[in-house]
């Protein structure tokens, strides 16, 4: 069977790995802790407004610092579970079992695995390779992403991944794995060129004079 870096063959299943690392409810909560630090930064403006209002009202600096610290702490404590819940359904890998010709599949999410489904529940796998190429003279390199869509019997799963590999190899590997089970795998490539920034337009002195001039 053809192989690819995103496909990992184990003793019991072949996994389409979409995000490396462990998964599970505890791990999801722990990994959300760092991201939650951004919540107080995003809500920094209203926090500063409160601090400014207190300062104008004559509150002591120590009181302002304590109140701001409490607000920031509450924002973090509220944002942490909200982020964990929002990431709980993120897809991290798809397990096809057994190894070889799969008879079932299981979607593994950040909060843990879903129940097993018969492989017939997967109608189609759609790969869209999107490449944004630099314009002439652009120092930035091309950007490549891979959009993956799993068309299931009762739902669809869509996600986009940074991708620097060969999409044709991935498509061939998925066809070799899922073709015997009757699952269609399609690959489409979309190319575009990054927009070239336009110089800022300026009013010329001659233009301004012509607008202001008139007959007397």
Image (spheres, grey):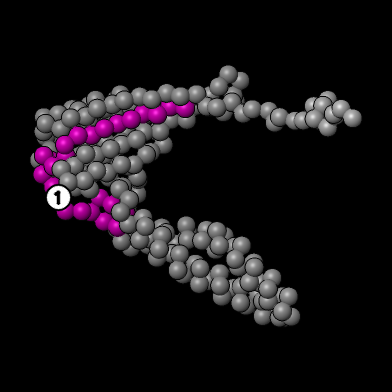
Image position, residue 12 (x, y; %): 15, 44
For the C terminus, the quadrant is top right
Image position, residue 109 (x, y; %): 28, 52
On the image, which quarter does residue 173 sit in?
top left
Q: Which residues are magenta?
A: 108-132
Residue at screen point 50% across, 72% down: 74
- Can residue 12 be spotted in the picture? no
- Can residue 73 be spotted in the picture? yes
Residue that badge 1 annotates: 116
Q: Main secondary structure of the magenta part?
A: strand
Residue at screen point 77% across, 30% down: 203
Residue at screen point 62% across, 28% down: 197
Q: For residue 120: magenta? A: yes
Crowd band around label 1 with a 10 angstrom C-alpha radius: few (<14), some (14–19), many (20+): some
Residue at screen point 75% across, 30% down: 202
In the image, 35: left or right of 180? right
Instruction: Give 75 or 211, whichever is nearer the viewer.
Output: 211
On the image, which quarter does residue 145 sit in?
top left
Instruction: Give 126 or 209, whichever is nearer the viewer.
Output: 209
Q: For residue 104: magenta? A: no
Image position, residue 31 (x, y; %): 41, 58
In the image, 156: left or right of 104? right
Instruction: Give 207 or 181, whichever is nearer the viewer.
Output: 207
Q: Secondary structure at mark 1?
A: loop
Image position, residue 124 (x, y; %): 19, 34
Q: Is residue 136 above or below residue 146?
A: above
Q: Residue furthest right?
A: 216
In the image, 59: left or right of 106? right
Instruction: Give 114 or 156, whichever is nearer the viewer.
Output: 156
For the N terminus, the quadrant is top left
Q: Is residue 77 above or below residue 23?
A: below
């Amino acid at each position: 069977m053809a192989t690819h870096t995103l496909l990992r063959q184990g003793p019991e299943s072949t996994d389409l790995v979409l995000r490396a690392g462990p998964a599970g409810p505890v791990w999801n909560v722990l990994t959300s802790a760092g991201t939650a630090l951004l919540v107080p930064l995003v809500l920094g403006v209203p926090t500063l407004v409160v601090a400014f209002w207190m300062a104008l009202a004559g509150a002591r600096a120590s009181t302002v610092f304590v109140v701001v610290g409490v607000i920031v702490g509450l924002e973090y404590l509220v944002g942490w579970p909200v982020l964990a819940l929002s990431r709980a359904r993120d897809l991290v890998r798809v397990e096809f079992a057994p190894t070889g010709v799969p008879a079932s599949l299981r979607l593994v999410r950040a909060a843990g695995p879903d129940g097993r489904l018969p492989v017939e529940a997967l109608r189609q796998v759609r790969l869209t390779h999107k490449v944004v190429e630099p314009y002439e003279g652009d120092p930035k390199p091309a950007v490549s992403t891979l959009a993956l869509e799993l068309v299931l019997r009762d739902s669809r799963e869509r996600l986009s991944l940074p991708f620097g590999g060969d999409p044709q190899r991935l498509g061939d590997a998925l066809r070799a794995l899922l073709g015997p089970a009757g699952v269609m795998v399609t690959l489409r490539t979309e190319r575009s060129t990054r927009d070239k920034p336009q110089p800022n337009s300026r009013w010329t002195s001659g233009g301004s004079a012509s607008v202001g001039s008139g007959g007397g």
